[in-house]
Amino acid sequence: MNAAVELDREVLAVRETRDFRSYQAFLRAARTHMEGALVAQMRDSYDAQLAAAGRSEPETAPEAAAMLERLPEFQLYCWYYRHLQRFKYSRPDLGIVDTVNRERERVIRVLDETAAQAGPALRLDPALEPPEYFRMVDFHQHPGGVAHDPLDGLVYEIGRRTTVPQHADPNGIYRLLFDALPKERRYARVLDWGTGHGQALITWQQLHPESECHGVDLSAPCLKLAHRRAVEHGFRFHLSQQDLERLDYPDAHFDLVFFNFMLHELPPSHTPALLREVARVLKPGGLFAGHEFHLRPGDAFQNVLQRSHAWTNNETYSVPWYSTPIEAIARDAGFSKTRVEPFERLIKSIPRTGRRAVSNSWWNLYVFEK
Ligand SMILES: C[S@@+](CC[C@H](N)C(=O)[O-])C[C@H]1O[C@@H](n2cnc3c(N)ncnc32)[C@H](O)[C@@H]1O
């Protein structure tokens, strides 16, 4: 292998000082406490309020919310959710944005040079108008959103290390999804629906070297990093900057379209058109599959926590997502079979001494067949 190619495969990274790493590890530990011991303690206090009122469960969701809002544990939980993300990204000196910015010129140069050599492996569209819903929100508090600055892809990638604390390896979540897909099928051509910085595609290609891998996203900075990561791994993806609602692929093109952390980010008014477009580009019998967080049926306590993320973490469209009739929409869009089931392997249970365990989150697995 010649020196230029060798250099090209060098992993693009910024220098992380020991202070940066310890600070980010502290934030991650705080998040683990927030989603574990703090939730268990909150549930104890909530149960005590119910016991004092001689009841086992609140009668309505607003009643559960009113009970929780009185608890200091819930107030702390919301404070944590809001501010751990802000500290992680935006603290001067130890935040991710500042750390990445310190090597701004070099990172942009490497991303741009790699992109310039990509040819059809990376199709960017500077004229693409992102939909209004995307421009209006700094999703999960990423400063300015994931598509406004050339460094957004790298900031997002580093930020994911502390987003899902129960997974020491933030990419384990993709393996869990892929492991849940039917094994007997052939996945010759796949699309990562909202690929971000492309990590799910990397994981997919490692497991399925035979697949032709495509990824679509609105964010050019994320796609440039996704392309860079593909080159570093010796993979060749087909990445393009498009709106998922209007894809330029021909009909019946893919065997599988998969998604991660997507449905809660899209306003329900767009969901029917988005799913019609997925159905159009899938081959007959092809699958649209992914995981997504949701409310836990019949668990008023957990659902107050789940809804609170909408305002604490700028998950603006998550509350309407919870009442979106996704299976009916999928059938109208052209899917013949729909399956939605709890994704047990992602649902973390928090033990409590002498009491029933509680959970802080709830995930479903979605598998729709055309
Ligand atoms: C929460 S991120 C998930 C990214 C990736 N799936 C992952 O696992 O990290 C949502 C992604 O969807 C992209 N996105 C949102 N709306 C989109 C649309 N209409 N068309 C294309 N991409 C979109 C965003 O730019 C962002 O990268």
Image (cartoon, rainbow, N blue to C red):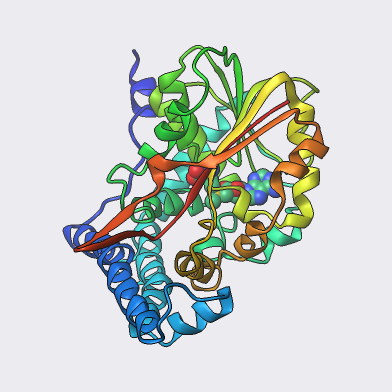
Q: Is residue 256 above or below residue 332?
A: above
Residue placed most toward the observer, 157 or 289? 289
- Horizontal relation, residue 132 to residue 164: left or right: right
Which quadrant of the rendered structure holds the C terminus?
top right
- Horizontal relation, residue 191 to residue 222: left or right: right
Question: Visible in this render: residue 219?
Answer: no
Q: Is residue 163 above or below residue 85?
A: above
Residue placed most toward the observer, 162 or 332? 332
Q: Residue 168: x and y, percent?
A: 27, 46
Q: Is residue 244 above or below residue 121?
A: below
- Where is residue 132, by image quadrant? bottom right
Q: State how many labels appear.
A: 0
Which quadrant of the rendered structure holds the N terminus?
top left
The extreme front residue here reads 54
Residue sitting at x 59%, y 13%: 188
Residue sitting at x 54%, y 16%: 211
Q: Residue 21: x and y, percent?
A: 22, 57
Q: Is residue 118 above or below residue 355?
A: above
Question: Visible in this render: residue 95?
Answer: yes
